[in-house]
Amino acid sequence: MLPILRQLFSEWPISAPILFGVAIALSLITVIVVLTDRRCRSQTAISWVLLVLVAPMVGPIIYWIFGKAWLSAKREASYRAVADERREVRLRDEASGAGLARRESREAVLKALDEDQRHLAVQAASISGEFPLGGNEIEIFDEADALFDRLAADIDKAVQHVHIEFYIALDDATSARVFAALERAALRGVETRLLLDGLGSRGFLKSERHSQLRAAGVRVVESLPVGIIRRRFGRVDLRNHRKVVVIDRSIGYIGSHNLAAKDFKVKERYAPWIDATMRVSGPAVNDMQKIFVEDWYLETDEELWHLVGQGIRDGHEPAIAQVIGTGPATYESAMPHLILSIVHLAEEEVVLTTPYFVPDEPSLASLLTAARRGVRTVLVVPEHNDSLAVKLASRKYYQRLLDAGVEIWQYRGGLLHAKTIVVDGKTCLMTSANLDRRSFELNLEASLVVYDATTSQRLRALQESYLARSRRIVPSEWYARPAWKRLVENAVGLLSALL
């Protein structure tokens, strides 16, 4: 490359000042955009500005490809249409007789919560507009085989529609039972829709199984296509990371499982992948339906709003649950603010599990504060991670956490991929979001907050099974690590705001 540049400058001497001027102009413009981006946190902005100043030509190019969470004009218009439709639905609902009953029910649900839970619920409602709903029956699945057996059985009972949305789908022995159930449902006249992320499921979308599903009548749509011509979302690395299923407006699934076996063929060396998903029966499923209907509309322009707000079956247990959808269209820092508030609820114990731990400063501060005020604060992460950069960057924070008294456990039974939080055994979060910038600012994510002791204690028991297969980091051993390891981790950690 350097010989080519030297030859270019020798033959056209004017090229050097022109390129220098372009680099300076591009850098200045990029710095201005970074500093005026309302969604860009200070830590992230500093990292981008430093990169632009250190690499005046390469830095700006990297920023414009991967740094700014920009949406295409088409996608911006679609999001506005979704927001307008949500507002119209809410106004029509409020004006109806049923609207009054729902308002009274909402107030009753909020009153049933503790004061701190009520504050969390109101904050969460500010993200996507959904308040908590009571009367939900919730089951927790950790094994992919058991989960997809149950999902296939639910699909076989469907009479109206099956809506499925995943980041990754693989054609393997475990997922095959779900695909077979989808084909059977479509052949008997049930409306079946399958929404798969264009990058995460790229291989599947080119597979024979995909063709078989379409031939059977299953409508398969690529979410956020990665092709230059077909892509309508703006940045190529803005992904639909949600894992949501809705069946007949009454049964829903939400969590961290992808549509794949736990041996996860695309990354077998880290297997088994350990996930968790909640099966919900009750009113909260309607809000999961809203997420799917909106995402489907954004890709197809097909309106399915008539499927929202009807035919919701009451559950048999009183679990109060709240569905939250986050992404580039929600207000900035919505997801980290939610996590911060959940951690601040803790009076005795908070346990978090996540595969990718690269927190922003407020999220980190919430863990440090919880530990220093006497709350048992436990962080469980995989010992081996499929992302070396994330693994190194996350370790930059370990000493501060250990100094504050946070327990850090490394899971040794595979790649712990479950994203969960349990607070005091009475409030819990099941989510597709990781504790990193990508989930906070870039990905479309789906979460379920459950204000229920029974469900929270079941999830806490699952977390305890993770701890039984984990090794706790001993502070004295951690501090005694070689200096070169600390140097590498701190160096990579400088880029943590960009990961």
Image: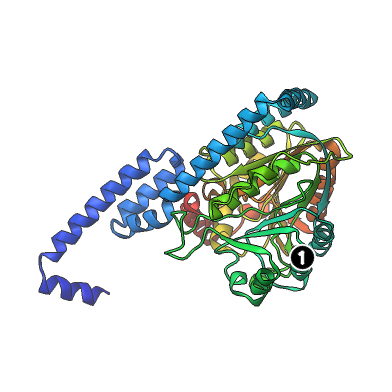
Place of residue 13 in the rendered image (x, y in percent of width and height, measured from the top left): 10, 68
Q: Would residue 173 be visible to someone looking at this image?
A: yes
Residue closer to the observer: 44 or 121: 121
Say which quadrant the N terminus sits in.
bottom left
Q: How many marks?
A: 1
- The relative height of residue 230 versus residue 107 in the rendered view (above or below) is below
Place of residue 439 in the rendered image (x, y in percent of width and height, measured from the top left): 57, 49
Residue closer to the observer: 494 or 305: 305
Place of residue 470 in the rendered image (x, y in percent of width and height, measured from the top left): 76, 57
Q: Is mark 1 on a helix, strand or loop?
A: helix
Which residue is at 59% across, 44% downward?
Answer: 326
As drawn, the residue found furthest toward the front would be 189
Place of residue 386 in the rendered image (x, y in percent of width and height, measured from the top left): 61, 65
Render colour scheme: rainbow
Name the image quarter holding residue 214.
bottom right
As drawn, the residue found furthest toward the right would be 316
Q: Would residue 422 be visible to someone looking at this image?
A: no
Name the image quarter holding residue 93.
top right
Which residue is at 35% across, 47% downward?
Answer: 49
Residue closer to the observer: 195 or 38: 195
Left or right: residue 375 compared with residue 83: right
Which residue is at 31% across, 57% downward?
Answer: 55
- The relative height of residue 470 versus residue 317 in the rendered view (above or below) is below
Three-letter amino acid code at disc 1? Val
Name the image quarter holding residue 217.
bottom right
Left or right: residue 359 compared with residue 152: left
User: Mark 1 sits on what residue?
Assistant: 178
Label 1 environment density (alpha carbons within 10 Å; few <14, some 14–19, many ≥20): many
- The relative height of residue 315 versus residue 495 in the rendered view (above or below) is above
